[in-house]
Image (spheres, rainbow, N blue to C red):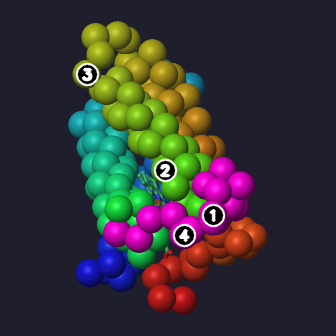
Protein backbone atom coordinates (compact mmCIF):
# COMPACT_ATOMS: atom_id res chain seq x y z
CA UNK A 1 0.00 0.00 0.00
CA UNK A 2 2.77 2.44 1.02
CA UNK A 3 4.90 1.50 -1.98
CA UNK A 4 1.92 2.12 -4.25
CA UNK A 5 1.40 5.63 -2.84
CA UNK A 6 5.14 6.50 -2.99
CA UNK A 7 5.20 5.36 -6.66
CA UNK A 8 2.01 7.30 -7.43
CA UNK A 9 3.40 10.41 -5.70
CA UNK A 10 6.62 10.07 -7.67
CA UNK A 11 4.87 9.75 -11.07
CA UNK A 12 2.39 12.57 -10.33
CA UNK A 13 5.36 14.92 -9.96
CA UNK A 14 5.96 14.53 -13.73
CA UNK A 15 2.28 14.99 -14.55
CA UNK A 16 2.23 18.27 -12.56
CA UNK A 17 5.48 19.51 -14.08
CA UNK A 18 4.36 18.85 -17.68
CA UNK A 19 0.89 20.39 -17.18
CA UNK A 20 2.37 23.34 -15.28
CA UNK A 21 4.86 24.02 -18.08
CA UNK A 22 2.06 23.92 -20.67
CA UNK A 23 -0.04 26.27 -18.48
CA UNK A 24 2.90 28.68 -18.15
CA UNK A 25 3.64 28.71 -21.89
CA UNK A 26 -0.06 29.15 -22.78
CA UNK A 27 -0.58 31.93 -20.20
CA UNK A 28 2.54 33.77 -21.31
CA UNK A 29 1.60 33.55 -24.98
CA UNK A 30 -2.01 34.56 -24.21
CA UNK A 31 -0.80 37.55 -22.19
CA UNK A 32 1.85 38.74 -24.65
CA UNK A 33 -0.21 38.16 -27.82
CA UNK A 34 -3.45 39.47 -26.25
CA UNK A 35 -5.27 36.24 -27.14
CA UNK A 36 -8.83 35.32 -26.14
CA UNK A 37 -9.16 32.93 -23.18
CA UNK A 38 -10.48 29.63 -24.59
CA UNK A 39 -11.90 26.34 -23.34
CA UNK A 40 -8.54 24.70 -24.03
CA UNK A 41 -6.79 27.15 -21.65
CA UNK A 42 -9.44 26.48 -19.01
CA UNK A 43 -8.97 22.69 -19.38
CA UNK A 44 -5.16 22.76 -19.06
CA UNK A 45 -5.36 24.99 -15.97
CA UNK A 46 -8.03 22.74 -14.44
CA UNK A 47 -6.07 19.53 -15.07
CA UNK A 48 -2.94 21.18 -13.62
CA UNK A 49 -4.91 21.96 -10.45
CA UNK A 50 -6.46 18.48 -10.25
CA UNK A 51 -3.04 16.80 -10.56
CA UNK A 52 -1.65 19.14 -7.87
CA UNK A 53 -4.55 18.40 -5.49
CA UNK A 54 -4.21 14.65 -6.05
CA UNK A 55 -0.46 14.82 -5.30
CA UNK A 56 -1.25 16.87 -2.20
CA UNK A 57 -3.70 14.23 -0.91
CA UNK A 58 -1.22 11.39 -1.52
CA UNK A 59 1.51 13.55 0.09
CA UNK A 60 -0.66 14.11 3.18
CA UNK A 61 -1.22 10.36 3.45
CA UNK A 62 2.55 9.71 3.19
CA UNK A 63 3.32 12.44 5.72
CA UNK A 64 1.05 10.98 8.38
CA UNK A 65 0.85 7.26 7.55
CA UNK A 66 3.83 6.54 5.25
CA UNK A 67 7.07 4.72 6.03
CA UNK A 68 8.37 7.85 7.83
CA UNK A 69 4.89 9.00 8.84
CA UNK A 70 4.29 11.33 11.77
CA UNK A 71 1.55 9.00 13.09
CA UNK A 72 2.64 5.59 11.72
CA UNK A 73 6.28 5.79 12.83
CA UNK A 74 6.99 9.09 14.58
CA UNK A 75 10.29 10.81 15.19
CA UNK A 76 13.05 8.33 16.23
CA UNK A 77 14.15 8.82 19.82
CA UNK A 78 16.92 11.37 20.25
CA UNK A 79 16.18 13.02 16.87
CA UNK A 80 15.57 16.76 16.83
CA UNK A 81 13.24 17.60 13.98
CA UNK A 82 14.80 20.90 12.94
CA UNK A 83 18.37 19.64 13.42
CA UNK A 84 17.91 16.47 11.39
CA UNK A 85 18.30 17.13 7.63
CA UNK A 86 16.20 14.11 6.61
CA UNK A 87 13.17 14.66 8.86
CA UNK A 88 13.28 18.46 8.52
CA UNK A 89 13.08 18.02 4.75
CA UNK A 90 10.29 15.39 4.63
CA UNK A 91 8.21 16.70 7.54
CA UNK A 92 8.68 20.46 7.13
CA UNK A 93 10.42 21.84 4.01
CA UNK A 94 8.92 19.53 1.37
CA UNK A 95 5.29 19.60 2.65
CA UNK A 96 5.37 23.36 3.40
CA UNK A 97 6.91 24.30 0.03
CA UNK A 98 4.58 22.02 -1.92
CA UNK A 99 1.45 23.17 -0.09
CA UNK A 100 2.34 26.80 -0.94
CA UNK A 101 2.85 25.72 -4.58
CA UNK A 102 -0.53 23.94 -4.64
CA UNK A 103 -2.22 27.09 -3.23
CA UNK A 104 -0.58 29.19 -5.99
CA UNK A 105 -1.73 26.71 -8.67
CA UNK A 106 -5.27 26.90 -7.23
CA UNK A 107 -5.14 30.71 -7.36
CA UNK A 108 -3.84 30.56 -10.94
CA UNK A 109 -6.70 28.28 -11.98
CA UNK A 110 -9.13 30.60 -10.13
CA UNK A 111 -8.23 33.38 -12.58
CA UNK A 112 -10.31 31.51 -15.18
CA UNK A 113 -13.48 32.51 -13.29
CA UNK A 114 -12.50 36.11 -12.46
CA UNK A 115 -14.44 38.82 -14.29
CA UNK A 116 -11.37 40.61 -15.60
CA UNK A 117 -10.03 40.98 -19.15
CA UNK A 118 -8.47 37.91 -20.76
CA UNK A 119 -5.06 39.61 -20.81
CA UNK A 120 -5.23 40.16 -17.02
CA UNK A 121 -6.35 36.52 -16.53
CA UNK A 122 -3.34 35.26 -18.49
CA UNK A 123 -0.90 37.66 -16.83
CA UNK A 124 -1.90 36.88 -13.23
CA UNK A 125 -2.18 33.14 -13.87
CA UNK A 126 1.26 33.20 -15.51
CA UNK A 127 2.86 34.64 -12.34
CA UNK A 128 1.01 32.26 -10.00
CA UNK A 129 2.06 29.25 -12.11
CA UNK A 130 5.65 30.42 -12.56
CA UNK A 131 6.22 30.99 -8.83
CA UNK A 132 4.58 27.60 -8.09
CA UNK A 133 6.97 25.92 -10.57
CA UNK A 134 10.02 27.52 -8.95
CA UNK A 135 8.89 26.41 -5.46
CA UNK A 136 8.15 22.85 -6.69
CA UNK A 137 11.56 22.60 -8.36
CA UNK A 138 13.25 23.87 -5.19
CA UNK A 139 11.50 21.47 -2.78
CA UNK A 140 11.30 18.16 -4.69
CA UNK A 141 13.70 15.44 -3.40
CA UNK A 142 15.64 15.24 -6.70
CA UNK A 143 18.06 12.27 -6.97
CA UNK A 144 21.10 14.58 -6.80
CA UNK A 145 20.04 16.07 -3.45
CA UNK A 146 22.23 15.09 -0.54
CA UNK A 147 20.58 12.76 2.07
CA UNK A 148 16.99 13.33 0.86
CA UNK A 149 17.50 12.44 -2.85
CA UNK A 150 14.90 10.07 -4.41
CA UNK A 151 14.75 8.37 -7.82
CA UNK A 152 13.68 10.12 -11.05
CA UNK A 153 11.06 7.41 -11.59
CA UNK A 154 9.42 4.84 -9.26
CA UNK A 155 11.56 1.84 -8.39
CA UNK A 156 14.71 3.10 -10.09
C1 LIG B 1 2.30 18.82 -4.98
C2 LIG B 1 3.56 18.70 -5.28
C3 LIG B 1 4.47 17.61 -4.77
C4 LIG B 1 5.45 17.04 -5.50
C5 LIG B 1 5.82 17.38 -6.94
C6 LIG B 1 6.08 16.03 -4.66
C7 LIG B 1 7.12 15.20 -5.05
C8 LIG B 1 7.66 14.19 -4.29
C9 LIG B 1 8.61 13.21 -4.75
C10 LIG B 1 9.19 13.15 -6.17
C11 LIG B 1 8.88 12.37 -3.72
C12 LIG B 1 9.84 11.14 -3.74
C13 LIG B 1 9.00 9.90 -4.05
C14 LIG B 1 9.89 8.65 -4.12
O1 LIG B 1 10.58 8.34 -3.12
O2 LIG B 1 9.89 7.97 -5.17
C15 LIG B 1 8.11 12.82 -2.57
C16 LIG B 1 8.13 12.21 -1.33
C17 LIG B 1 7.35 12.62 -0.28
N1 LIG B 1 6.42 13.63 -0.28
FE1 LIG B 1 5.95 14.84 -1.84
N2 LIG B 1 5.48 16.03 -3.42
C18 LIG B 1 4.49 16.98 -3.44
C19 LIG B 1 3.66 17.32 -2.41
C20 LIG B 1 3.73 16.79 -1.13
C21 LIG B 1 2.94 17.23 -0.03
C22 LIG B 1 1.92 18.37 -0.09
C23 LIG B 1 3.28 16.45 1.04
C24 LIG B 1 2.77 16.45 2.44
C25 LIG B 1 1.80 17.17 2.89
C26 LIG B 1 4.29 15.53 0.60
C27 LIG B 1 4.90 14.58 1.39
C28 LIG B 1 5.86 13.70 0.98
C29 LIG B 1 6.46 12.70 1.83
C30 LIG B 1 6.14 12.45 3.30
C31 LIG B 1 7.38 12.00 1.03
C32 LIG B 1 8.27 10.81 1.48
C33 LIG B 1 7.51 9.54 1.23
C34 LIG B 1 8.32 8.29 1.51
O3 LIG B 1 9.45 8.18 1.05
O4 LIG B 1 7.77 7.40 2.20
N3 LIG B 1 4.54 15.76 -0.73
N4 LIG B 1 7.37 13.92 -2.94
From the image, tell me which residue sits under label 4.
Answer: 76
Question: Is there a contact, CB below 8 Å, between mark 3 and mark 2?
Answer: no
Question: For residue 83: magenta?
Answer: yes
* Picture residue at 55% right of the left edge, 49% below the top: 92
At mark 1, the secondary structure is loop
Q: Earlier in the sequence, mark 2 or mark 4?
A: 4
At mark 4, the secondary structure is loop
Q: Earlier in the sequence, mark 3 or mark 4?
A: 4
From the image, tell me which residue sits under label 3.
Answer: 113
* Picture residue at 41% right of the left edge, 35% below the top: 103
Question: Is there a contact, CB below 8 Å, between mark 1 and mark 2?
Answer: no
Disc 2 beta carbon < 8 A from ligand 1? yes
Frontmost of labels 3 and 1 is 1
**Disc number placed over residue 95 in the picture, else none:** 2
**Quadrant of residue 120 within the rendered picture:** top left
Disc 4 beta carbon < 8 A from ligand 1? no
Q: Which residues are magenta?
A: 72-86
Residue furthest to the top: 116
Disc 3 beta carbon < 8 A from ligand 1? no
Q: Earlier in the sequence, mark 3 or mark 2?
A: 2
* Picture residue at 75% right of the left edge, 70% below the top: 146
Q: CA distance from mark 3 to mark 2?
A: 28 Å
Q: CA distance from mark 3 to mark 4?
A: 46 Å
Amino acid sequence: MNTFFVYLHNILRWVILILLLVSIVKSFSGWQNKKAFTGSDRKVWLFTMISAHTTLLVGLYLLFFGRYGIISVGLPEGTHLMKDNFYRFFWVEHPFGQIVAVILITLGNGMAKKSVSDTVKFKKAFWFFLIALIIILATVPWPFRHIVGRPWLPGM
